[in-house]
Amino acid sequence: MKQVSTTASRLPLIGIPRGMPYHRFGDLWKAFFKALDIQYVESEPTTLRTLEEGTAVALDETCLAMKLYLGHVMNLAGKCEFILVPGIKSFGRNREYCPHFEGLYDLVRNSCRDSRQKLITYQVDEPNGMSEADAFLELGKALGFGGREVKKAYQTAKREEQQRWQKRVLLENAKVRESGLKVFLAGHSYVLEDPYVGKPIRNFLEANGVTVLSGPVTDREQAMKNSGVLSPGCKWEINRELLGNLALKKKNIDGLILISTFPCGSDSMVNELLTRQIDSMPVLNLVLDSQSGMAGIETRLESFVDIIRFKRGLM
Amino acid sequence: MEKAFLGIDIGSISTKGVILDENNGILASEYIWTEGDPIQAVKKLLGLLEAGFDKSRYTIVGTGTTGSARKLIGTMVGATVVKNEITAHAVGTTTFYPDVRTILEIGGQDSKIILVENGVANDYAMNTLCAAGTGAFLSSQAKRLGIEVEEIGDYALSAKHPVSIAARCTVFAESDLVHKIQTGHAKEDIIAGVCNAVVANYLNNVGKGKRIASPVVFQGGVSKNKGVVAAFEKALHCPVTVDANGHLMGAIGVAILARGSKERREFDFSVENTDFHVRDASCGRCSNNCEIICVYRGDELIDSWGNRCERGSIRTKA
Amino acid sequence: MEQARKKVAFPRYAEYNCGLRYLMEKGLDVQCILPPKLTKRTMELGAQNSPDFVCTPFKTLLGNQIEALEAGADTLVMTYGLCKLGYFGELEKRILRDMGYQFDFVDLSDYNTGKKKDMLRALRAINPKVKPARFFLALAEAVRMTEYVDEITGDYYRNRAFVRDKKAYDGIYRHFLTAMYAAESRHDIEEGYHKAKLELAGAPMDRPENPLRVGIVGEFYTAMDEFSNLEVEKKLTDLGVEVHRWMTVTNRMLRYPGDNNLQVQIKDYVSYSMGCNTTANSWAALDYVKRGFDGVIHIKSANCTPETDAMTVLNNISSDSQVPFLYLTFDVQTSDVGLQTRLEAFYDMLAMRKKVLR
């Protein structure tokens, strides 16, 4: 095997946009780069500016999440040698991702081509023989590392990612035993965890004395096994995890809030099915677009919480 | 007798008419509200045009109609040319501004962009999704703020800290606006925000991916709004020309097209006094229930359209 | 005792239901209920009962399934697909059940594993006594019919602008479709095809030396279904345009060379498979541009995620090549008048450009 020198000085600086896949795979990327001693820089947390910069290059009809992602890319453009833009197609049958995740690399390439920023990628498509491990191997080799080194780094990173995740899940699952009102937030992690879009909703609920259960934070394997309870044929992995997590926790919650960004394709259908399946508790369906005010949303959240309190005789 | 050409542009909101001489000189022009009744509006328009026009010196030998009711009015006035408003605008504007590269247009319901190269339209786009960022949106927001549409410009220009408003969709924009009003922002800052939002929405929707080159000409009802013009100049970093006759450009364009066409038919102002009416017939031969529009002169059916298949086509006697 | 034959329905899918009917009746020995043609009522029924911001084809197909049940179908079959289509079946089933209908539902997505065993299971779900040999023979014939439908439809729209007698020409095409919907044998299919092929070729035409040529790309449902796209192709030929459409079942499913083989030809724009039909449409659009077409029209339904992605690529192809692209989005309420205006303006622009460029 070819020997590559890996002195930190000649390694490129990698940019990591904090949108869409970041909220699912970001820990893995960072651990992987750390293991290889590669420097990276993250885009600034989402603000109105991110949205504006993204909107300027995004197609008007595309979803809010995609606009934010492109905003994060633009935030990094010119500040690093490569920006990491993965393509996540599928981890197997009924473990698929939406077309934006699939085509992310070429979407960025076409949307941001005036910036002349260089990109680097890895493409996961298990049914066609490209596992995540293989994809990372190619990524590492493209950065000039040897196969053994990359494999080791990936394994270390994967272990670290899983440990962090297990800790989060443990804390999250403990909330089920808390007393008081418990509301389940069903939405993609890149919506719920975004400081500009989803975080304010969560903060508002918590400030109103509600315990918030985060839909995406769950033992993924267990959730996938249970997703069929609510929707046996769902093909999208992220939605299946939400469905499975909800099926496991639905007896312990007082209300369900569906949060999606306009016009999310998978949510438009899965949330419809979910509303038809769940009749035991109040459901609030929030569709977010680029509005910069929380006023309309706060009113709806407040009245929703009131409804639950009425139902439980707490008011 | 000298030759003259009549152009009529019948939109959903306003009806415009011009009479041109052979050198594109405007002999008469009028602008009135359509008020939901294109036939009455055109009769009124023709009356006004006739009053201000020297019939002893000119004969109208070609007539063009454009705008959403172009077909109906074309039948009614016996037009020699019936053209869509996008082409009409492009032709009118490039006649007066041969160097123009970009035509921005925001009307009551529609917004469009036309890119011009060498005096010929090269690319165009029209709003796809909804009415956010059009004239209808601006006037509803003005109403909400308790000011007249005509005042928007002055308010917007006096703003010091324009607020930011989401403009992609009317529903979202309105909830955003209500919130801004409630949180006590100054009226002029909100109005300037609305103007900026109209421009941002336009550039992100119809203007997406289009190379907007200067000179830029801005037309349509909204071009009368100084606030939006200023917002465009700021966003595009170039001067934006608004023609005093910009609102007439569709009518002018279709009059020029009538001049260019070979067909000649003398126009008779007596249509003002003829009874025209439209009846909607529902086909009913399948569950499409196509609405067939039948145009009558007195009791005589002179044209019909609107059926999706042959089953429902109503034939004129001619 | 032998059970009564199942009454199976598949919602309208452009003009492909003739092949599906043939396959169901000849290959699976079930009675095929052909749902009524799509109408305004179909759209209304679908929109009333569908989630708000799902893509339009979901609404159309759901509306047509309701009509199929009204027409007496007792079994609905739904296909799988690369996009949201792969989830249509499960949600449709639930909505129709909530509306109170009783029926069997065969969702091909449940069997979409790529394994022969699961394909047989799917067939048995439709008819437990299926004879595989007979099925595959009928499949080959249905595939042939589908290729013929695409070929004749292609001929029809390529030349319709120039024929002297449009009414007679339309008649040839309609008769061809009727023959395909009524075909009972391989012989019927071949005869209908050859008759139409000859008659279309024999129609008197005044073809200008250099007519405007427009290529159509877009969504796998809306670009192909003339009701959903308000007869875009017919409207264009009425204006005098030679219309080409690459997106057909033949090109996309039966003879598709694969994303990877097309990507090498568009590597300036696309490096990896972007999912669904994005690669296919980007390739087709660039191909039209390279072949000197005057314009390209992209057709999709409202809220179609993959075609929105494709537009990102098409925008760049258009701006690099300076060939005008027109983007049309169709939903339940798209107005015919608005479409006509856009098409006329597009036509005028292409015609004027052509004059200047030459």
Image (tube, rainbow, N blue to C red):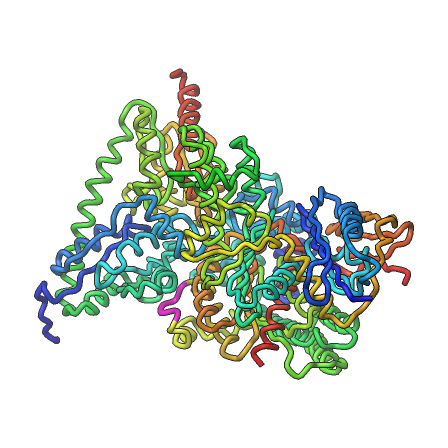
Q: Residue at x 28, y 53 (%)?
A: A75
Span of residues in magenta: C269-274
Left or right of residue C248, residue A265 in this image = left
Residue A49, x across and y down, in percent: 33, 47
Q: How many marks?
A: 0
* Residue closest to the eye, A290 or B59: B59
Kindly report the secondary structure that dominates the magenta region of the rendered protein: loop
Image position of B75 (left or right of A9): right
Task: From this view, report whether residue C145 is shown above or below residue A173.
Answer: below
The residue lying toward the viewer, choosing from C244 and C130, is C244
Query: Where residue C146 appears, x then y in whole percent?
Result: 61, 71
On-image quarter of the C terminus of chain B: bottom right
For residue C28, say whether it is visible: no
Where residue B258 appears, x then y in whole percent? 73, 66
Q: Is residue A278 above or below residue A5?
A: above
Locate residue A257 relative to residue B118 in the image: left or right: left
Q: Which residue corresponds to the image point at 69% horizontal and 59% vertical from the top-left?
A: B26
The answer to whether residue C94 shows anywhere in this view is: yes
Coordinates of residue C86 in the picture (x, y in percent): 48, 55
Quadrant in which the N terminus of chain B appears: bottom right
Q: Residue at x 77, y 62 (%)?
A: B63
Residue nearer the viewer, B234 or A175: B234
The answer to if B279 sits in the magenta stretch is no
B105 left or right, relative to A68: right
Is A290 above or below relative to B205? above
